[in-house]
C-alpha cells in the first residue's frame, strides 16, 4: 500500500538535512565571528537619527529607519555571549522542529498512523511548538534588549524587549492545533483498538 | 474487574472442538481463539447468540465478571 505520509516525509527529511547543515554551519561561523570580531545585532527599538534632509531623498520626504544594525567593536565576554544568544536559539529550535516532525512521520509510517503512540507523539510535537519557539525567541529578545540597553546613551525602557520579541504566531496556532489533533487521534485510535478487539 | 470467558470448559463439556464451533457459529477460528484466550475487547450480541445456540447455554455460562488480578 502506498505510504499516505509521502511526499511530506521526504520533504521534511530534506528540510531537516538543509536546516541541520545551515544551523551547524551558521552556529560555527557565528561563534567564530562573535568571538573574534565585533558583536552586531539588528534591533527594532534602537534609536536612530531621522534622515530628514538626506540627499538620498527628495526635499519633502522624510525617512525613518525602523531597524538599525548596532555593532559593538570591542565587546566584553558578556556581550559576546549575548551576541550568540541574540540569534542562535531559534535556529536550533527550528532544526529541532524539523527533526521531531521527521521522527513523528517516520515512526507513524513504520508503526501505523492511526495508533495511540502516534497520537502521543503528535501531542508532544504540539507541546514542543508551543514552548520551544516562543521561549527561544523570548530569550533572543531579552539578549538583544540587554545588548541595546548597554549600547545606548539614553535611558530606554527595559520593556522594549516586548517589541523585540518576534513571537512566532504560527508556532502557537499550530501547536494548539497539534494538541487538539493529538487528543482527537488518541480517542479515535482507542475506539479503533476496541473495534479490532470485538469478536 | 475483568470478564472471563469459559469457552474452554463449555467446549470440553460438550466434546466439541474450536474448529467445529467455528463452522457452526460462522466466526473464524482466529477470532474464537482471541475470545477463548481472553484477548477480546468486546463481543457482539450476534456472536453471543450464535455461541449460546451452538453450545446450548446461557450468556452467564459463557461469561463471568471477576475482580482484577493483583500483580
Image (cartoon, coloured by chain):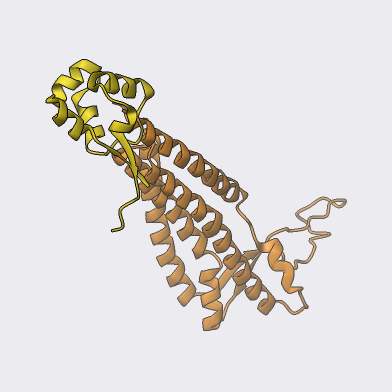
Chain colours: A orange, B yellow
Task: Say which residue appears at 33% left-offset and 29% top-offset.
Answer: B59
| A140 vs B70: above or below | below
- Residue A3 % position (x, y): 33, 31
| A74 vs A131: above or below | below
Instruction: Depth check: give the residue in front, A88 or B14.
Output: B14
Q: Which residue is the extreme one toward the right?
A: A60
Please tell me in which quadrant of the rendered image residue A145 appears.
Answer: bottom right
Task: Say which residue appears at 50% left-offset and 75% top-offset.
Answer: A37
Task: Say which residue appears at 60% left-offset and 71% top-offset.
Answer: A143
Task: Say which residue appears at 72% left-offset and 67% top-offset.
Answer: A160
- Residue A123 % position (x, y): 47, 49
Left or right: A146 with respect to A102?
right
- Residue A29 % position (x, y): 42, 66
Left or right: B10 with respect to A80?
left
Image quarter (top left, top right, bottom left or bottom right) of the N terminus of chain A: top left
Residue A18 visible to the viewer: no
Instruction: Depth check: give the residue in front, A8 or A185.
Output: A185
Amino acid at each position: 500500500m502506498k505510504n499516505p505520509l509521502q511526499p511530506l516525509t521526504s520533504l521534511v527529511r530534506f528540510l531537516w538535512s538543509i536546516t541541520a547543515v545551515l544551523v551547524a554551519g551558521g552556529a560555527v561561523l557565528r561563534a567564530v565571528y562573535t568571538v573574534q570580531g565585533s558583536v552586531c545585532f539588528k534591533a527594532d527599538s534602537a534609536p536612530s537619527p531621522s534622515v530628514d534632509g538626506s540627499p538620498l531623498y527628495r526635499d519633502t520626504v522624510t525617512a525613518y529607519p525602523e531597524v538599525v544594525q548596532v555593532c559593538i567593536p570591542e565587546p566584553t565576554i558578556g556581550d559576546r555571549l549575548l551576541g550568540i544568544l541574540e540569534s542562535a536559539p531559534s535556529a536550533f529550535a527550528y532544526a529541532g522542529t524539523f527533526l521531531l516532525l521527521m521522527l513523528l512521520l517516520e515512526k507513524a509510517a513504520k508503526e501505523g498512523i492511526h495508533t495511540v503512540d502516534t497520537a502521543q507523539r503528535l501531542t508532544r510535537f504540539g507541546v514542543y511548538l508551543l514552548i520551544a519557539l516562543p521561549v527561544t525567541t523570548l530569550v533572543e529578545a531579552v539578549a538583544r534588549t540587554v545588548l541595546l540597553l548597554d549600547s545606548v546613551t539614553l535611558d530606554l525602557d527595559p520593556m522594549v524587549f516586548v517589541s523585540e520579541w518576534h513571537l512566532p504566531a504560527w508556532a502557537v496556532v499550530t501547536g494548539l492545533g497539534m494538541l487538539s489533533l493529538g487528543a482527537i487521534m488518541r480517542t479515535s485510535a482507542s475506539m479503533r483498538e476496541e473495534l479490532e478487539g470485538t469478536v | 474487574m475483568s470478564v472471563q470467558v469459559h469457552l474452554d470448559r463449555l467446549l470440553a463439556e460438550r466434546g466439541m472442538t474450536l474448529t467445529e464451533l467455528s463452522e457452526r457459529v460462522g466466526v473464524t477460528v482466529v477470532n474464537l481463539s482471541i475470545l477463548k484466550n481472553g484477548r477480546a475487547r468486546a463481543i457482539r450480541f450476534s456472536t453471543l447468540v450464535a455461541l449460546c445456540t451452538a453450545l446450548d447455554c446461557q450468556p452467564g455460562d459463557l461469561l463471568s465478571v471477576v475482580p482484577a488480578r493483583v500483580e
